[in-house]
Image (tube, helix red, strand yellow):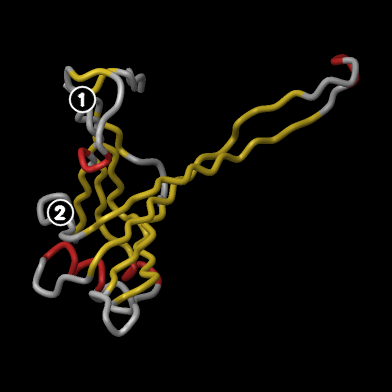
Amino acid sequence: MEMNLQKFAGKTNVFPVLDNQFKIGESKEKATTIADMETFSPTFSNGVETWTPMDMEGWQRALMTAKAITITLNGKRNIGDAGNDYAAGKAFKNGHDAEGYFEWIMPDGTSISWTNAVIDVKNNGGGDSTNVGALEIDVISNGKPTVTPAL
């Protein structure tokens, strides 16, 4: 997949983070957006194996052998919103019950999705007494994603 990060959907240079979209649900067909999310942060983890062969005169060689991504979403708990309820409902789940469909649609229209992403709820309604209840989740990749380039 090759993306021109400087040109999203006919626009150039910078773009507002709000142009990213996220969908969650039991399946792609049932997935909806998650209401009231305020921030998101993708974290990429890469497995790199290194070695120092004698024929490289002390210089290290390397090969990337693994990939993972965690997408952190923070916002407000919105009872009654299908996406928000679905994510919050994973708080007390374990094993495969903690998995669900997740899709990240980037500003240029590229879609990255997992059929069985792990939904790790970090905060479900907490905060100061005068705050609106929070919903904070980590969506953890579970296998290779389906990447659909923008048209």
Mark identifier at residue 33: 2
Where residue 36 sits, quadrant-wise, is bottom left
Image position of 37 with respect to 121: above or below: above
Question: Would you call the spot at circle 1 few (<14 residues within 10 Å), some (14-19), or many (20 or more)?
Answer: some
From the viewer's perspective, tell me whether residue 28 is left or right of residue 104: left
Residue furthest to the front: 130
Where residue 32 sits, quadrant-wise, is bottom left
Q: Position of residue 102 (x, y in %)?
A: 26, 52
From the viewer's perspective, tell me whether residue 147 is left or right of residue 59: left
Residue type beneath disc 1: Ala
Q: Residue at x 27, y 62 (%)?
A: 75
Residue type beneath disc 2: Thr
Image position of 145 with respect to 54: above or below: below
Question: Would you call the spot at circle 2 few (<14 residues within 10 Å), some (14-19), or many (20 or more)?
Answer: some
Q: Position of residue 17 (x, y in %)?
A: 27, 40
Which quarter of the figure is the N terminus placed in? top left
Q: Secondary structure at mark 2?
A: strand
Image position of 83 with respect to 124: above or below: above
Q: Position of residue 71 (x, y in %)?
A: 38, 51
Q: Position of residue 67 (x, y in %)?
A: 51, 40
From the viewer's perspective, tell me whether residue 151 is left or right of residue 5: left
* Residue named by callout 1: 150
Q: Secondary structure at mark 1?
A: loop
Mark identifier at residue 12: none
